[in-house]
Amino acid sequence: MAKKNNTSEHLPSKADVMKFIMLYDFLESAYVEMKDFSKKNPDAALNERKVKSLNRILKDIKDILEYEPTASYMDVLDEEMLPSNSDVVLAMSQYRSALDIFRKKYRQYKSYDHYWHTSDGEILAKDLEGVERRNWN
């Protein structure tokens, strides 16, 4: 697969933002679970099923962030040498940071509302998100 050119003028599509919102929630819930596992047993290896499940989320996030500078710093989990709980938490925290950077770049406040700046034009955030996200303000 040919790598796409990285350009600062590339805006996400409405579909990208909708997928971002879904994946953000998936990643957050998985991150909370992995942090709990890591606290109990940081060096325990994940099973193959969990790694594959997490990688589906991580790969989709990488696809959305492919034009962003953070993309080159995000690796998916190794499915052959199963990572430890603490390794997974570290990787997922990098993805969380990258998603937050993306959100802050393309979701902005103006005229008393939040808007997503997309290739489809400015879209009212609550129209895509369904409800106001308190922690995103």
Image: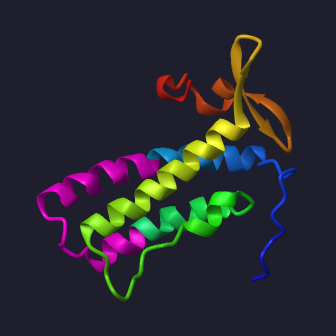
Residue shown at 63% from the left, 68% from the top:
72
Residue that sits furthest to the bottom in the current view: 80
- Can you tell which quarter of the image residue 87 is in? bottom left
Q: How is the image coloured?
A: rainbow
- For residue 132, what is the image quadrant? top right
Relative side of 133 to 90, left or right? right
Please say whether residue 44 is visible from this viewpoint. yes
Residue 91 in picture, x, y percent from top left: 42, 64
Camera-nearest residue between 77 and 124: 77
Residue 101 placement: quadrant = top right
Q: Is residue 89 left or right of residue 14?
A: left
- The spot of residue 121 in percent (x, y) is 86, 35
Residue 18: give x, y in percent of width and height: 65, 44
Give the answer, above or below, for where 109 lies relative to 54: above
Question: Is 49 within the magenta?
Answer: yes
User: Which stretch appears magenta?
Assistant: 26-53
Is residue 119 found inside the magenta-colored segment of the image? Answer: no
